[in-house]
Amino acid sequence: MLPRERAEKILTLHAAGWPVQAIADHIGHSHQTIRDYINGRRTPGTRAPRPSLLTEPLARYCRQRLTEDPHLRTSVLFKEVAALGFQGSRATLYRELKRRHRLPVLADRQEPNSQEEPPQVPSGMSRTLARRHKRTPVLPQRVAPIAGETLNSYLARIAQANHLTVTEVLAVLPTWFSTKTNNLDDRAQHHMLAPAATQALHELAHLTSTTPAGLSRALPAFDTDEGPVRATTACCHRCTARLGIRQPVPVHLPIHHKVCTRHGVWLSDLGEPHLDLSICPEITTAQHRANRLLRRFTPQQLTLAHQTAANAVPPWPTSPAAVPHHWRYRLLTLQTHNHHRGVSTELDTYAHAAIYPDAIELAAGALAKHSHGPARSTGGNSPHLRTMAPVGHGRFATQDSSWQVRATASGTTR
């Protein structure tokens, strides 16, 4: 930025009829700088804004992730957008989210340059585990965990099934559980808690008469997988009903997992009712197609492509003949069908479900168009979509929720 006096002198000389070449020689700056002030691209005394590294597609991705997972940590979100092509630092991402796009910010994002505060670990926790003379008791009622279930929810269901309080359950478990349940994010694996996680897992398995492997696969609190997830309620109500569970169970599902393909249920975000999709089977078909896309692309790439495509779907059909195949017709059909089940029609969930087949179709086309093989940039119109080598997409990335419940309940593996 030039000093105000020098910038104003450029404008004065230009008003006096000086050519750009003469002004550049007199002031001692490049022709481009002179033209920027003359053409109004720069204002005297005002610093030129720096180009934002967080593009609008990435900003929409961040907005969706923070909405779907309210307790998402900055470090996890930064890894996701970095894999999608974000070139800035973690502090830059934080600043863009807070200032430019006014996105919600968690408490652990308040000071991005400061070191992460360790959780409140009770003194002598490791000694407590090492000196346990009595084995953890075994509860009479066995409770199967649901895939992705939060630790607080599972402990509450254990207590309810055995006519106890959560406090009484925690009293017979290592203090690791009391510390962990006080944290907002089950998936946060702090280095002070990690050493005691294995012992805590075996104690909980003994208490509930389940296998450590089954608990580790089902509960994110013991899972080391950093695959992106979203917060919702358990799988689908039909899947949980098979296990005798009637109340909503908060879980974390992979971000691409929108539909229970076995029962045709739209898995809405946390706090919103699920939708019956039996009237629109093409939505379930779109979920199968999304699952197949994960053989070549990461969940982050698919989510970004879906997010971009959803904004590109035309709001109205091209002709009256296309109305029955357009998403607005599908929206009305879903609202009418689910209204009889007592689900309010004034929900954004309907639009998300109705537009899903169209968005997945556009996303698949965009990903295929810019795919040139593993570990190569897609380039062109979508610089933030990269085709990377196949990676793990989570412990139940492409399986429907019914398999998750069955496998978790039985403790089997594939």
Image (cartoon, rainbow, N blue to C red):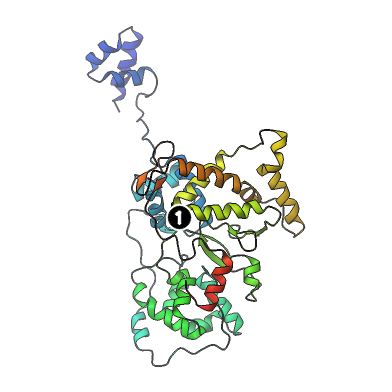
Please give the name of the residue rendered at 47% of the width and 74% of the height, measured from the top-left corner: 413
Mark 1: which secondary structure? Answer: loop
Query: Which residue is at the front of the view, 374 or 313?
Result: 374
- The answer to whether any part of residue 172 appears in the image is no
Q: Give the labeled residue for mark 1.
A: 295
Quarter of the image for residue 192 reads: bottom left
Near-viewer residue (346 or 315): 315
Left or right: 341 in relation to 210 = right
**Total numbered labels:** 1
Picture layout, residue 243 above or below residue 110: below
Q: Is residue 282 left or right of residue 88?
A: right
User: Which residue occupies the extreme right position in the image?
Assistant: 340
Q: In this rendering, is residue 1 above or below 291?
A: above
Determine the residue positioned at 43% across, 72% down.
Answer: 222
Q: Is residue 218 above or below residue 167?
A: above
Above-or-below relation of 247 to 275: below
Point out residue 242 in the picture as x, y percentages from the top left corner: 64, 74
Residue 127, picture quadrant:
bottom left
Q: Where does the image place residue 179, in percent across and percent down from the top left?
A: 43, 74
